[in-house]
Image: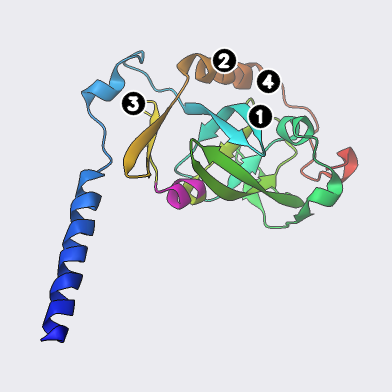
């Protein structure tokens, strides 16, 4: 009889877990568009706490498989070459050029009470963004993003939290990218102390 009770108890606990999980369905509706300018085709640009600092101009790219940090953020965080580890796999830049970053760093990224350790590859090329967070961050957080709704939603402490995008910053980043005149840029951070 004790085996049957234990199975029943396990089944009840699994049912309770299933009910809690069912309550935390993450989705988007027309109400999530409130406060956004519609229609639009803006990138999802948010502010995140990275390495203990609030960092603006962070693009969420669910199509990318790795997180990127650009020189402005590297310098702004006061990172030093000894904080970095070697990295040598090629990436394709926005312009379609092959870029081979030389270094990476693992930093905490905080959203409310959740902290996820993220491996950022440091890329020494121009970008209007400070960083790009991608699928590894989204998956570790259990998050779902929507450029249409300009939000990232994620479960934490039995609730669904959200991070709102900033369309005005997304517009400024787009204008900066269009106006940028490419110079002779290096993919190696060695010349600039990265």
- Mark 1 vs 2, N-terminal side: 1
**Marks 4, 1: nearer the viewer:** 1
Q: CA distance from mark 2 to mark 4?
A: 12 Å
10 Å crowding of disc 2: few (<14), some (14-19), many (20+): few
The secondary structure that dominates the magenta segment is: helix
Q: Residue furthest front?
A: 2
Residue 100 makes an appearance in the image: no
Identify the secondary structure beneath mark 2.
helix
Residue assigned mark 3: 149
- Mark 3 vs 4, N-terminal side: 3
Specify the quadrant that holds the C terminus: top right
Q: Which mark is residue 127?
A: 1
Residue assigned mark 2: 172
Residue 162 in which image quadrant: top left
Instruction: Give the magenta-colored segment's residue range.
Output: 137-142
**Marks 3, 4: nearer the viewer:** 3
């Amino acid at each position: 009889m004790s085996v049957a009770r234990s199975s029943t108890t396990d089944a009840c606990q699994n049912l309770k877990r299933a009910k809690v999980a069912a309550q935390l369905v993450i989705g988007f509706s027309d109400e999530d568009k409130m406060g956004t300018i519609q229609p639009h085709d803006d990138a999802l640009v948010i502010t995140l706490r990275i390495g203990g600092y609030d960092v603006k101009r962070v693009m969420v790219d669910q199509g990318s498989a790795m997180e990127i940090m650009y020189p402005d953020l590297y310098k702004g965080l006061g990172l030093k070459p000894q904080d970095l580890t070697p990295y040598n796999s090629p990436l394709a830049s926005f312009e379609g050029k092959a870029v081979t970053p030389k270094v990476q760093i693992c930093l905490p990224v905080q959203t409310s009470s959740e902290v996820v350790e993220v491996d950022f590859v440091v890329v020494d090329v121009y970008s209007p963004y400070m960083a790009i967070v991608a699928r590894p961050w989204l998956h570790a957080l259990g998050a779902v993003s929507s450029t249409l709704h300009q939000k990232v939603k994620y479960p934490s402490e039995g609730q669904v939290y959200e991070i709102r995008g900033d369309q005005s910053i997304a517009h400024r980043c787009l204008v900066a990218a269009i106006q940028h005149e490419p110079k002779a840029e290096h993919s190696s951070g060695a010349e600039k102390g990265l």
